[in-house]
Image: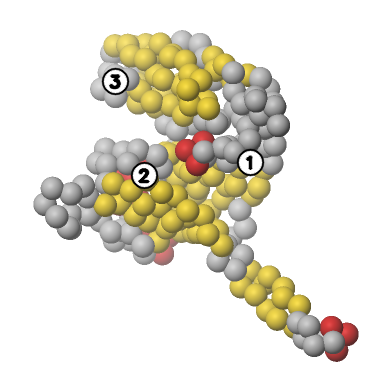
Amino acid sequence: MAKSDLGFARNYANALEVNTTPEAAAPTWAILSRGITSITPSPNEGTEDKDYYDGYGTPTTDVTSTQIQYEVEGDRCYGDPAQDYIASCALETGEGRRTQFRHTAANGDVIEGDCTLLNLTPNSGQGEASALGAFSCTIATAGAPAFKPGGKLKLPEQVTAEAVTVNVGGTKAIAAEVTPAEANGKCFYASGDTDVATVDSDGTVHGVKDGSCKVTVRAASKPSVMCEVEVTVSAA
């Protein structure tokens, strides 16, 4: 395998996101990243065994239903959009536990669809006094999610994006480009000053107050490949 190929990617090159505004017309994606130490996808499958005469005593197993459950664990980080939203659903039932998820693999494969939030606690404050609060949840697919193959097997070499100007209370998307084209185009975003502007995990900048700041853009499958975007926020 060539040195520039993706190869054995680290788990942090994956991105698991939740929609924090399921009631809105457009999703607001927030990534489960800050404070998260482990994300474990596991299958929840229903099966049925059939032993037909032409099998001569050897049964055949069919999968009758399938579901992916993402077990998420880490430290409670207050102010993190994904954690705050999930924690706010702890006392909800029914539709109050439903939203959407998006899982982007290191090679650009995307699994996206509806989900149910399970095993939630409002806020963790148990254990030793000096210990960090724990965060955990299960994101279980609801219905049949969509699979979009990426097949991007090259490592990113460069990520570029132009400066962004946005009004207070407005939004503007950062158009990040990852090269080469054979690399996963997914990026991670972080605002250098959330008092001036915040940024969703899909690169949408929200103007908070007059001023300027920088947003760091990192290539998901190789976070050391990055750039900084100048963001200017002006009064409407």
Tell me if residue 18 comes above or below residue 44 in the rendering: above
Pair 2/1: label in front: 2
Contact (Cβ within 8 Å) of mark 2 with mark 1 = no
**Distance from label 3 to label 2 (Cα)?**
22 Å
Q: Which residue is mark 2?
A: 36
Q: Which residue is mark 1?
A: 109
Tell me if residue 10 comes above or below residue 125 in the rendering: above
Residue 7: name its quadrant.
Answer: top right
**Kind of residue sitting beneath label 1:** Asp
Residue 23 on image: x %, y %: 43, 47
Secondary structure state at the residue bearing disc 1: loop
Contact (Cβ within 8 Å) of mark 1 with mark 3 = no
**Distance from label 2 to label 1 (Cα)?**
21 Å
Q: Which residue is mark 3?
A: 193
Apparent side of residue 60 relative to residue 183 in the rendered image (left or right): right
Rendered-image quadrant of the N terminus: top right
Tell me if residue 131 comes above or below residue 196 in the rendering: below
Residue 139 on image: x %, y %: 45, 55
The tag earlier along the polypeptide, 2 or 1, is: 2
Residue at 54%, 44% in the rendered image: 103
Q: Is residue 203 visible?
A: no
**Kind of residue sitting beneath label 3:** Asp
Apparent side of residue 133 relative to residue 38 in the rendered image (left or right): left
Residue 172 on image: x %, y %: 46, 21
